[in-house]
């Protein structure tokens, strides 16, 4: 089992990843009920990175949520996949959509 937490001294650059998310899952993140994503780790996700979840319904809808990756683990995942702990970022007191 491997897991990663943010270590500011070792990680200098924070990367922003843009990823698709289906409408049902988008709504659950927006409502605060879903605080994780299971993804193929083909982008070298790191704790502290940002993800922009872009709603996808056969095409982009224009809705998006920016989140911070707070935790990563590959525990009990298929090879090459990880679970990302995510937290929506706030801008002026409102979630970013």
Image: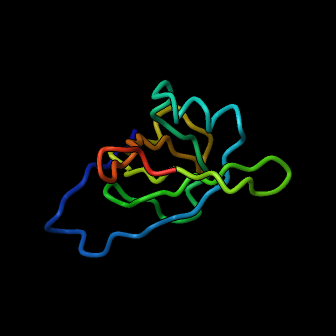
Q: Quadrant of residue 85?
A: top left
In the rendered image of this protein, does residue 35 appear above or below residue 88? above
In the rendered image of this protein, does residue 65 appear above or below residue 42? above
Q: How is the image coloured?
A: rainbow
Residue closest to the eye, 3 or 62: 62
User: Farthest residue in the left direction?
Assistant: 9
- Give the left or right position of residue 8, taking residue 72 as reference: left
- Give the left or right position of residue 47, taking residue 74 as reference: left
Residue closest to the eye, 60 or 86: 60
Residue 58, position as x, y percentages in the image: 86, 51
Residue 5, position as x, y percentages in the image: 27, 49
Q: Residue shown at 49%/40% (left/top)?
A: 83
User: Farthest residue in the top direction?
Assistant: 33
Q: How many marks?
A: 0
Q: Residue shown at 37%/61% (left/top)?
A: 49
For the N terminus, the quadrant is: top left
User: Farthest residue in the right direction?
Assistant: 58
- Give the left or right position of residue 10, taking residue 65 as reference: left
Q: Residue shown at 58%/52% (left/top)?
A: 64
Q: Residue shown at 48%/36% (left/top)?
A: 36
Residue 96, position as x, y percentages in the image: 45, 51
Residue 27, position as x, y percentages in the image: 61, 33
- Give the left or right position of residue 7, taking residue 24 as reference: left
């Amino acid at each position: 089992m491997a897991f990663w937490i943010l270590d500011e001294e070792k990680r200098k650059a924070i990367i922003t990843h843009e990823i698709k998310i289906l409408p049902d899952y988008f709504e659950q993140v927006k409502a605060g009920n879903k605080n994780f994503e299971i993804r193929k780790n083909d982008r070298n996700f790191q704790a502290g990175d940002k993800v922009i979840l872009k709603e996808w319904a056969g095409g982009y809808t224009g809705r998006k949520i920016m989140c911070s990756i707070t935790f990563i683990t590959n525990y009990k995942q298929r090879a090459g996949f990880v679970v990302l702990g995510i937290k929506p970022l706030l801008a002026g007191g409102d979630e970013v959509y």
